[in-house]
Image (cartoon, grey):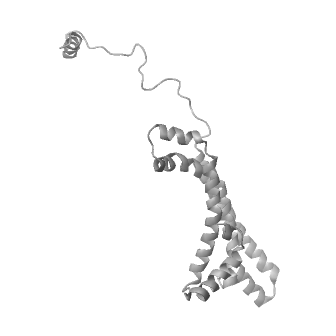
Amino acid sequence: MEVFRGTPMILQAVFIYYGVPYFFGYAFKSIWSVSILVVSINTGAYMAESVRGGIMSIDPGQTEGAKAIGMNHFQTMLHVILPQTFRNILPQIGNNYIINLKDTSVMFIIGFAEFFSIHKMVSGAIFKYFPSAFLEMGGYLIMTLVASVLLRLLEKKMAGKSNYELVNTDQLVMTAGTYNYPAAGSPFDERSKEFRRGK
């Protein structure tokens, strides 16, 4: 994690794409696989710290309460800690996603055809840098805005309702005066008499 958080993604792409064949003799068959690998590892390094911080932010009483009702460590993490952690770190997850969406532009260094590489090709062909850069910025802006809207909707869905109705009475306890007694002479009345007599 420290290596991938402490080095630029552009150098990581160069090292993996050119270094792996150099040191291990394995040549990547697809530039897509290298790009996905680099972005995934880089994202994973940052996400690991986000998840760790999210887990540490949960009150220790949650773990103690889960263990008090008989949950083991796996059940506690799966059903109590991680759902709260995910809700807490969802903004950070969205932020990392948007950053990586823009950072894919550095993959041009290994020949991956994406927005920035197309911009370089177009601007080199027609010698008009600003219109090409303007379109590229517009494309990235549209993608990040759409991602932001979807993430806001997900956050709102996970937050639940804005107001809740408090329950003032216990639904499991019948209100006084609503208990029904068997009618006199009915089979239920005879059985209740036998029960009271201990038969």
Specify the quadrant that holds the N terminus.
bottom right
Q: Position of residue 85 (x, y in %)?
A: 59, 50
Foreground: 23 or 174? 23
Q: Is residue 191 left or right of residue 66?
A: left
Q: Is residue 141 visible?
A: yes
Q: Position of residue 82 (x, y in %)?
A: 54, 50
Q: Residue at x 63, y 72 (%)?
A: 39
Q: Position of residue 11 (x, y in %)?
A: 70, 78
Q: Is residue 152 visible?
A: no
Foreground: 37 or 128? 37
State whether residue 84 is above or below residue 127: above
Q: Position of residue 135 (x, y in %)?
A: 74, 75
The quarter of the displayed image where residue 96 is located: bottom right
State whether residue 170 is above or below residue 50: above
Q: Residue at x 50, y 41 (%)?
A: 66
The quarter of the displayed image where residue 119 is located: bottom right
Specify the quadrant that holds the C terminus.
top left
State whether residue 138 is above or below residue 150: below
Foreground: 183 or 48? 48
The quarter of the displayed image where residue 71 is located: top left
Q: Residue at x 67, y 82 (%)?
A: 14
Q: Is residue 195 left or right of residue 147?
A: left
Q: Residue at x 60, y 70 (%)?
A: 40
